Amino acid sequence: MRLDKFICKSTNLTKIEASQRIHLGEVRVNGDIANNEATQVHENNIILLNGNPLKTRPFRYIMMHKPAGTICSNIDEVYPSLFNYLDLENVAELHIVGRLDVDTTGMVLISDDGRWSFNITRPSQHCSKVYRVGLSKKITEDARSLFKRGIQLQGEPQLTLPAHLELITPTEVLLSLTEGKFHQVKRMFAAVGNRVLSLHREKIGEVSLDIKTGQWRDLTNDEIQSFTK
């Protein structure tokens, strides 16, 4: 974690204020004055601000049910940020773990623990995500076979990783993916001549969505640990 971020997470200082304190020589790391806000520090370092030891606030791990028409961003843009649904202090410290499009609904994970988030999103982790997909046409057996083998997306040098399709109705499926390319679900169905009408993420890893639209809750300890196995 950067030193300025560590100070912000340990105090009520803004990032600018933390940088000012660092440049004034008020911060020591393991006994030495630290004057670079980008210095990487860890929980086991001894960090002092004007002689007072700092300890970061506990990390937060949150599940939210994203409504349609919101964006996975910390700030409002053309559409409102889903962070408007979070009634929490220091919201600016949080980030979204795996984004969804503005018209996509469902499960979003939110945290301020960068290492935990990276463990979920890094490709080698192969963290499974399950989507309920509404389609404009009936899914064909040929399309199901292509999903299982891997699909060539436009502009991509390699096939997608094998994906599992479970038929709910002729035009509704559950799709399980272990990668997260840009607009991947919509591009995969477009590649087999179909079109996504609705998209909803129901599950990430071993954790399933169990709250109503617009609601959020803290993850349980077991849920948090399930992503670090």
Image (cartoon, grey):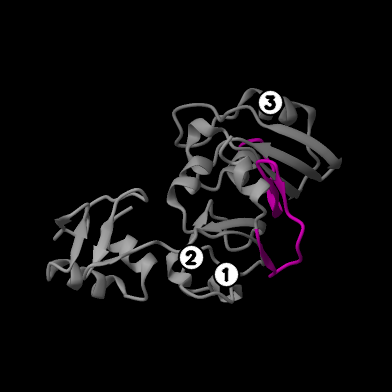
Mark number displayed over residue 82: 1
Tell me if 104 is positioned left or right of 1 in this view.
Answer: right
Amino acid type, label 1: Leu
Residue 196 drawn in magenta? yes
Residue closest to the far right: 169
Name the quadrant of the C terminus: top right
Tell me if 14 is positioned left or right of 58 in this view.
Answer: left
Q: Which residues are magenta?
A: 191-218
Dot 1: element:
helix
Depth check: give the residue in front, 219 or 54. Answer: 54
Amino acid type, label 3: Lys
The image position of residue 67, as x and y in percent, is 67, 67
Do the numbered discs 1 and 2 sit on residues whose CB atoms are within 8 Å? Answer: yes
The image position of residue 124, as x and y in percent, is 49, 30
Q: From the viewer's perspective, is residue 127 above or below residue 107? A: above
Mark number displayed over residue 148: 3
Query: Which of the two discs, 3 and 1, labels the residue nearer the N terminus?
Result: 1
Depth check: give the residue in front, 185 or 30. Answer: 30
Residue 195 drawn in magenta? yes
Q: From the viewer's perspective, is residue 176 above or below residue 52? A: above
* Structural distance between the alpha carbons of marks 3 and 2: 32 Å
* Structural distance between the alpha carbons of marks 1 and 2: 7 Å
**Number of marks drawn:** 3
Which residue does the image show at 26% across and 50% down from the upper left?
A: 40
Amino acid type, label 2: Ser
Q: Which residue is mark 2?
A: 73
Tell me if 79 is positioned left or right of 8 in this view.
Answer: right
